[in-house]
Amino acid sequence: MWKLTVEANPHNQIAVALGSESRVGECYYLGLTDSATGTEPGAETVRAGLRQLLSGWLVLLQRLSDGQQVFLPFDFSDEYTRWISVRRSGADAEVVFGWAAVEGWAISLQDFSELSCSLTGFCPDEPLVSQQVYLPRLIQQVRCAVLGLGSGLGLGMGMGMGSVSC
């Protein structure tokens, strides 16, 4: 069964597994979402940032029209970002992991939709692994991840900062 798993750990890393593929990246910037409050990045701020990131994914996937492509960010490194390319074809979606030369600090979690819809320079990972998934299933998996982070589910799984598997 095709499944989405998202996990943030205490080492400022995010692990994303989609079907048969998984990647690990930097999520330090997810913990800075509460910087206006002066709160130090920690488990709850990273968790809030992860919830905000996945909520943004959900909005983009729900708006995706047939034939359109959208890019979902997940690794916010200093000199590049990692993305999941999602291209809709009817009720299905093709998903591919890759990266682009966009600095992680340059992406706003409050609204990354413009960049996600117009990303240039996306480079698929090699070897190229393209997976097909029923789009409503992908949307349901992301929705489950958002709800799991919001309800406190996932603590104690993985490395303890937030893990969601549907």
Image (cartoon, rainbow, N blue to C red):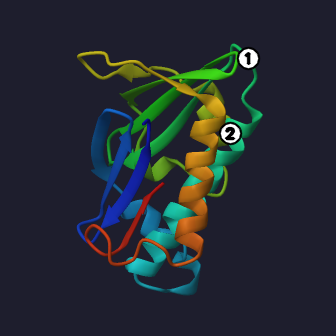
Residue 21 vs 46, above or below: the answer is above
Q: What mark, if any, has residue 60 been given in the picture? A: 2
Q: What mark, if any, has residue 104 been given in the picture? A: none
Res. 145 in view: yes
Residue 39 percent coordinates (x, y):
47, 86
Question: What amino acid type is highlighted by mark number 2?
Answer: Leu
Residue 30 percent coordinates (x, y):
45, 63
Residue 1 percent coordinates (x, y):
42, 36
**Which one is earlier in the sequence, the residue at label 1 or at label 2?**
2
Left/right placement of residue 63 relative to residue 68 reads right
Q: CA distance from mark 1 to mark 2?
A: 13 Å
Residue 85 percent coordinates (x, y):
50, 27
Residue 97 vs 127, above or below: the answer is below
Provide the residue designation for mark 1: 66
Residue at image coords 40%, 51%: 5
Left/right placement of residue 148 relative to residue 105 reads right
Residue 155 vs 99, above or below: the answer is below
User: Callout 1: 10 Å neighbours few (<14), some, many (20+)?
Assistant: few
Asked if the residue at tag 2 contacts the one at tag 1, i.e. Cβ–Cβ closer than 8 Å, the answer is no
* Residue that extends furthest to the front in the rendered view of this protein: 1
User: Callout 2: 10 Å neighbours few (<14), some, many (20+)?
Assistant: many
Q: Quadrant of residue 103?
A: top left
Residue at image coords 66%, 35%: 136
Residue at image coords 58%, 76%: 151
Where disc 2 sits, the SS reads helix
Residue at image coords 57%, 49%: 142
Please identify, in this view, whether the residue under mark 1 or under mark 2 is nearer the observer. Answer: 1
Question: What amino acid type is highlighted by mark number 1?
Answer: Asp
Where disc 1 sits, the SS reads loop
Res. 41 in view: no
Give the camera-side residue of 153 and 51. 153
Give the camera-side residue of 77 and 46. 46
